[in-house]
Amino acid sequence: MKHTILALVSLLATTPMMAQYAWQYDAHPGKLDLGEGIRYRVETQGSFSKDKTPLWLNANKHGLSSLDETNGYVRATAIRPLLNDSSRRWGVGYGLDVAAPLHYTSNVVVQQAFVEGRWLHGTLTIGAKEEPMELKNNRLSSGSQTLGINARPVPQVRLALPRYWTIPALGRWLQVKGHIAYGMMTDDSWQHSFTNKQSKYADHVLYHSKAGYLKIGSEDRFIPWSLELGLEQATLFGGTAYVPDGSGGMRVIENDKGISSFWHAFVPAGGDKPSEGTVYRNKEGNVLGSWLVRFNYDGERVAWHLYADKYYEDLSSMFQLDYDGYGEGDEWNTKKKTRFFLYDFKDWMLGAELNLKYGTWLRSVVFEYLYTKYQSGPVYHDHTVGRNDHLGGRDDFYNHYIYTGWQHWGQAIGNPLYRSPIYNEDGSIAFTDNRFMAFHLGFDGQPTPRLDYRVLATYQEGLGTYVTPYTKKHHNVSFLVEAGYQLPKGWQVRGGYGMDFGHILGSNAGFQLTVSKSGVFNL
């Protein structure tokens, strides 16, 4: 791991890069003042609903939301962005974002608290910071399947190339960006309260994520076409898991917390899960991720994008292949033949986005289709002494048999159409509707310089899970109509109305009002 980080830092410092910062144009940096150019925002929000808060008034807010009928917060944010030092080869940023909520999962929410530094194009961030989704519209998309914007930020150490930089040796046609991060989940107290320590929970769980994105295109030549390819991967590992033992007690599972576990999380091969022993050697922790691709056209008046997000829960579904060539008898666990099982290409998120650059009443339109019903098939059979056939189905997206799944503080870290555990009324931290099909539409506009709006609408058909299927198909329709108005001196008023219909989320209706004041100050 150390050698990987050192190599990345060295690459950032020595490789010529695409012009993006003022220092590349020999701009004079001036005197450094870390107390200058601090951006502040003071905000209060109230939500008033019949039954639960509707989906699109709750989701994709970086976890700063609640399902209670009446909820709200007062929030104060102060951030010095790295952009302040764009005229320097290095930069410093920091931020603090705190909310005092009403009827939330916490009495006080430290939403963001971080410091970060930049050297040339590489950044190092320490702390909790809201990060945007990649390759999707953060305002209109239903959300990424792996690294979304639906849950609270995880405190972490993050080394990143946040913007694309160009490799000149390849004719300036190839650009890359990405990140590596390690952190720790902060929802132990919420898990204790939510489960009453009677169903599965886990303490001090460690977090790892990494992502790399490759862009093929050349804006320097004014060519409007480009292709982006990406891989996002995350792992929950370490910590102590508590799983019901079937006799009214809890089985304690002490997961690996040593230095080697960090390496096995980075390279998901060869880690041991304590519950599996050494025969069925598996990956370190809960490994998941997505393959991403997006095709872009960026014209003078119109831009459009076509994209796909292929989610996976293990290496077999990552590559759509599983090894199935084990021997027999004493060689039942020995690889003897060149034989593989090919899974169907079914579980996808497919999307299209249209941007009208000079539009007013209509600016952007996003349409997405999600299908997660297959999950490598309904049959799971690991090879044994008596049967050497190996089929790895029933992937159970977002769930895990040791950890509490791909969630933080009860909200899905990825796409919120996977029904988040915070909806469960039985005290279980689990995703109970991860096999579904959905259509999602979002569009927005800005009729006047001060007035903007957006509309989201989603239809979903769910089957439950392979382990606990619904007795019949469940359906859900959710929509949101939201508008914001800019007032003088940095004031803004935003209101939204949302509704849910169906058996997946229930019948909900609610209104949300947000009033904020933003600006810049100097210490």
Image (cartoon, grey):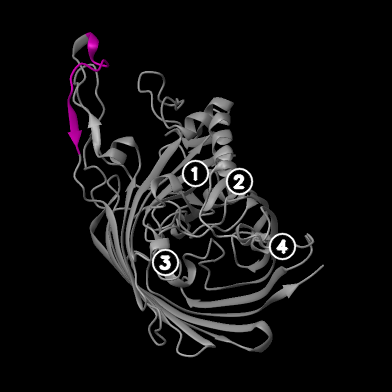
**SS of the residue at dot 1?**
strand
* Sequence-wise first label, 3 or 2: 3
Ranked by sequence position, the earlier of labels 1 and 4 is 4
- Which of pointers 3 and 2 indicates the residue nearer the eye? 3
On-image quarter of the N terminus: top right
Residue found 52% across the figure and 51% down from its top: 17
Q: CA distance from mark 4 to mark 3?
A: 35 Å
Cα gap from disc 1 to disc 4, whole angstroms: 37 Å
Q: Which residue is mark 3?
A: 137
Name the mark nearer the viewer: 4 or 2. 4
Q: Position of residue 258 (x, y in %)?
A: 58, 26
User: SS of the residue at dot 3?
Assistant: loop
Q: Report the residue marked by disc 1.
A: 209
Between 426 and 442, the residue placed more toward the observer is: 442
Marks 1 & 2, CB-CB < 8 Å contact: yes
Q: How many marks?
A: 4
Q: Earlier in the sequence, mark 3 or mark 1?
A: 3
Residue on which the image places disc 2: 156
Local secondary structure at mark 2: strand
Task: Report the magenta stretch's main SS.
Answer: loop
Residue 28 image label: 4
* Quarter of the rendering containing residue 226: bottom left
Label 1 crowd bin: few (<14), some (14–19), many (20+), radius 10 Å: many
**Which stretch is magenta?**
330-342
Q: Quadrant where the C terminus lies?
A: bottom right
Callout 4 touching callout 2 (CB < 8 Å): no
- Contact flag, marks 4 and 3 (Cβ < 8 Å): no
Q: Tell me the residue at 43%/26% (across/down).
A: 275
Residue at left offset 23%, top offset 9%: 330
Could you tell me residue 75's position as x and y percent? Answer: 67, 70
